[in-house]
C-alpha cells in the first residue's frame, strides 16, 4: 500500500481512504530530496538487518510506504511494517 497522512486539507477524491488496523507497527523514516529514492534501501535494511536482530517477527499483512513533507517543505519517506514481539 502506498499512503500519505490525511488531514482536513487532503484531497481524497478518487482515492480509497482506509483506517489502519490496530497493530504494532515498526516505522522507518528517511529524509529525501525526491520521492522514491530511499524506499528500496529501507525495505532492504528492514528485512536483511532489522527483523533478524530486533526481537520482533513480521506479521502477515500490509507493508506501507508513506510519502510526506515536514512543515518546512523538506520531504521524507517512511516504511511501516506490521510486527509482533517474539
Image: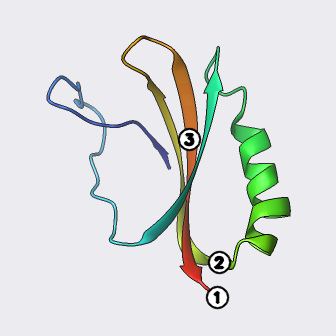
Residue 80, relative to residue 59: is it above or below?
above
Q: Which mark is residue 78?
A: 3
Q: Which mark is residue 19?
A: none
Residue 63: give x, y in percent of width and height: 56, 58
As drawn, is 60 to the left or to the right of 24?
A: right
Residue 60: give x, y in percent of width and height: 57, 77
Residue sitting farthest toward the bottom: 86
Measure the alpha-carbon separation of dots 1 and 2: 5 Å
Measure the alpha-carbon separation of dots 2 and 3: 19 Å
State which tag comes first along the sequence, 3 or 1.
3
Residue 75: give x, y in percent of width and height: 53, 20
- Mark 2 or mark 3, whichever is nearer to me: 2
Label 1: how many Cα within 10 Å (few below 14, some 14–19, many 20+):
few
Res 72 → quadrant = top left
Q: Which residue is painted at 27% across and 57% down in the image? A: 19
Q: Secondary structure at mark 3?
A: strand
State which tag comes first along the sequence, 2 or 3.
2
Residue identifier under label 1: 86
- Mark 3 or mark 1, whichever is nearer to me: 1
As drawn, is 3 to the left or to the right of 15?
A: right
Nearest to the observer: residue 53 or residue 76 = 53
Numbered label tally: 3
State which tag comes first along the sequence, 1 or 2.
2
Residue identifier under label 2: 56
Q: Are marks 1 and 2 in contact (CB under 8 Å)?
A: yes
Residue 41: give x, y in percent of width and height: 79, 41
Amino acid at each position: 500500500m502506498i499512503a500519505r497522512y490525511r488531514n482536513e486539507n487532503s484531497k481524497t477524491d478518487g482515492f480509497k481512504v482506509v483506517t489502519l488496523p490496530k497493530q504494532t507497527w515498526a516505522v522507518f523514516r528517511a529524509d529525501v530530496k525526491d520521492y522514491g529514492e530511499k524506499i528500496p534501501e529501507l525495505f532492504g535494511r528492514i528485512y536483511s538487518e532489522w527483523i533478524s536482530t530486533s526481537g520482533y517477527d513480521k506479521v502477515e499483512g500490509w507493508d506501507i510506504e508513506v510519502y510526506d513533507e515536514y512543515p518546512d517543505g523538506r520531504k521524507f519517506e517512511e516504511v511501516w511494517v506490521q510486527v509482533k514481539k517474539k
